[in-house]
Image (spheres, rainbow, N blue to C red):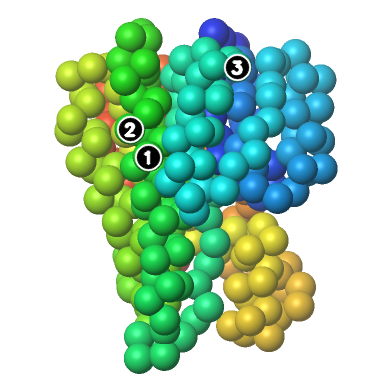
Amino acid sequence: MEALEGRLALVTGGSRGIGRAIAMALAADGADVAIGYRRDEDAAREAVAELEARGRRAEMFGADVSDPADCERLAHTVLDAMGPVGILVHSAGIASRGGAVARTEPDEVDRLFRIHALAGFVLAKHLVPSMRDLPRGDVVMISSVATSHMAASSSPYNMAKAAQEALAMTLAKEERRNGIHVNVVAPGLVETEMGRRLVKGAMGVDDIHTLDAGSPFGHVCTPEEVASVVRFLVGGAASYVTGVRITVDGGTF
């Protein structure tokens, strides 16, 4: 059943990892997809080709979401090229370097804040007004379980994700009257390029699958498992759901 037929989704970080899985899941439910990417043009092109092979309308849009002006440009370029965005998924993100507060430079805090929180703010600012005219709108922020436990040596990431969640919860209250749902999905460790780098840097683990046996349900979370939650939140089954944060960590935290 193509429950999202006629809706357009913009997925930032949509060329790889969690973002790509979300793009494919939404397309499977009938949505057309705008893929936001930063550097990996080949991966974005491959994602668009796969979406088109599935019979969906898809285009790729390069942007540096750490730059608020580029976020604004991205929003208006997508609107001009593909029409009103009914589903905004802000999935683009990076990890912090892992230093204690006393050894962390403000520039790193600023960069992560701009990518995770300010980018979501700017995109919502420019996409939500036209979303109000649609039968339904959805904004989903991809956060992290990092905000549940606020681990040491990760202040830039923790701060950025906390601000991103604050944005989502505020926006949910503001836009509920306009038929717009705003929710947060907070994964734990996921089998992505960033996840593999994290376990290698923190644990010296070269193969993330060596963690499968000790993980909930016998495997590290996959991007598709995160995408399934987004799929639920933007679909008809979640017609009365807004302002919630769903963790996808197998109950680890």
Whether residue 124 is visible to the viewer of this picture, yes or no, is yes
Q: Are marks 2 and 1 in contact (CB under 8 Å)?
A: yes
Residue 122, disc: 1
Separation of residues labelled 2 and 1 (CA atoms): 5 Å
Separation of residues labelled 2 and 3 (CA atoms): 18 Å
The percent position of residue 50, horizontal first and vertical second, equals 79, 28
Left or right of 217 on screen, residue 123? left
Identity of the residue drawn at 55% across and 40% down: 12
User: Looking at the image, which is closer to me, 20 or 253?
Assistant: 20
Mark before the other along the chain sequence, 3 or 1: 3
The percent position of residue 214, horizontal first and vertical second, equals 60, 73
Residue 81, disc: 3
Q: Residues within 10 Å of mark 1 (few under 14, many from 20)?
A: many
Q: Residues within 10 Å of mark 2 (few under 14, many from 20)?
A: few
Task: Give residue 27's quadrant in the image.
Answer: top right
Task: Give the secondary structure at mark 3.
Answer: helix
Q: Which residue is mark 2?
A: 125
